[in-house]
Amino acid sequence: MQILLSLFLSFFKIGLFGFGGGYAMISLIQEELKSHGWLAIKDFINIIAIAEMTPGPIAINSATFVGFKVSSILGSIFATFGVITPSFILVIIVAHFFKKAQKSPYINAILKFLRPVVIGLILTAAFTISESSFIDLKSLIIGSAVFIVMLKTKVSPIFIIILSGLAGIILYG
């Protein structure tokens, strides 16, 4: 029961401070995994890849997968409820005060401040994941090519994922 409570509280904290959505939460999730010793970084990278390929928000998918790896079905339930509970509470509060808060200069100032924070969290997650994802020159070339294609074209991310998977099979298979 202690592990389930730890999963809930850890993911509650991630959900509470994960401004900017799932990508911004990746570095927070990684920090929690490291502090509890629940998963190795390589396993976490695989979970992120799976969470990206499955439907739904990456934070919820990651919480579900991590919870399952740590403590089976109950672990996934507790971790998932932990990560969604702060958002649920916040939405209820915001919905109640939305009309007043919408025109508040204080709320607008907070949101303007949080935008660059979210970018910083996402960039931190990107660098952390890239450290263990770029294992050789081939992986660096694939990652760079995908980055450039996504930046310069309107190619579907699904198409890019399929092509990258095929490239991985050809280069590493």
Image (cartoon, rainbow, N blue to C red):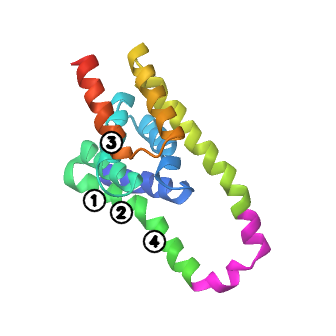
> Which residue reaches farthest right?
105
Does the magenta segment cover residue 34? no
Q: Whole-Å distance between the Cαs marked 3 and 4?
A: 33 Å
Location of the C terminus by quadrant is top left
Do the residues bearing badges 3 and 4 touch, measured as CB atoms within 8 Å?
A: no
Do the residues bearing badges 2 and 1 touch, measured as CB atoms within 8 Å?
A: yes
User: If you read the primary sequence from the N terminus, does the residue marked by circle 1 or circle 3 appear first?
Assistant: 1
Secondary element under disc 2, as helix, strand or loop, is helix
- The residue shown at (36%, 36%) is 44
Side of 165 where 160 appears, left or right: right
Q: In the rendered structure, which amino acid carries the disc numbered 1? A: Ile
Position of 153 relative to 135 (above/below): below
User: Which of the two discs, 1 and 3, sits closer to the camera?
Assistant: 3
- The residue shown at (56%, 78%) is 93
Q: Which mark is residue 88?
A: 4
Do the residues bearing badges 1 and 3 touch, measured as CB atoms within 8 Å?
A: no
Residue placed under numbered mark 2 in the picture: 81
Residue placed under numbered mark 1 in the picture: 77
In the rendered image, residue 119, in percent from the top left (x then y), is placed at 62, 46
Position of 142 relative to 108 (above/below): above
Q: Whole-Å distance between the Cαs marked 4 and 1?
A: 16 Å
Secondary element under disc 3, as helix, strand or loop, is helix
Label 3: how many residues lie within 10 Å, few (<14), some (14-19) or many (20+)? few
Does the magenta segment cover residue 98? yes
